[in-house]
Image: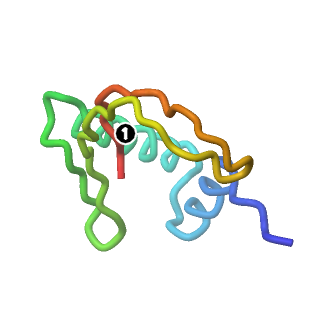
Amino acid sequence: MAQKPMTKSEVMASLSEASELSKQQVAKLLDELSGLISKNLQNEGPGVFTVPGLMKIKVVRKPATEEREGINPFTKEKTIFKAKPARNVVK
């Protein structure tokens, strides 16, 4: 069985122990980082955020898709797939 992912409090406790910062300081740091990421990924921002040596997050504009006919892989019947609007996806 796969392990469960860490909860927010477990992440904060682990970072607190490793960095010798208090849990409150780690919580504030994570909140500020979250706000900074949001600000950079919004329409006014560059659409890209990088944590050096850790990760790069970017917004990709997915185009709209038209309604189309296809085959349901389970029932092998023809079906109509609904159109989807254009949207922003975070990768």
**Residue 35's image quarter?**
top left
Q: Residue at x 26, y 44 (%)?
A: 59
22 versus 69 height, above or below? below
Locate residue 23 relative to residue 55 in the image: left or right. right
Q: Position of residue 6 (x, y in %)?
A: 69, 58
Question: In what quadrant of the picture does the N terminus appear?
Answer: bottom right
Closer to the camera in the image, 24 or 49 = 49
Going by the numbered disc 1, the residue's amino acid type is Glu
Q: Residue at x 57, y 47 (%)?
A: 71
77 versus 56 height, above or below? above
Q: Which residue is mark 1?
A: 32
Locate residue 79 relative to residue 66 in the image: left or right. right
Q: What secondary structure is found at the residue carrying circle 1?
A: helix
Q: Residue at x 45, y 46 (%)?
A: 30
**Residue 57's image quarter?**
bottom left
Closer to the camera in the image, 68 or 46 = 68
Q: Position of residue 23 (x, y in %)?
A: 59, 49
Closer to the camera in the image, 70 or 34 = 70
Closer to the camera in the image, 66 or 10 = 66
Q: Residues within 10 Å of mark 1 (few under 14, many from 20)?
A: few
Q: Position of residue 40 (x, y in %)?
A: 22, 39
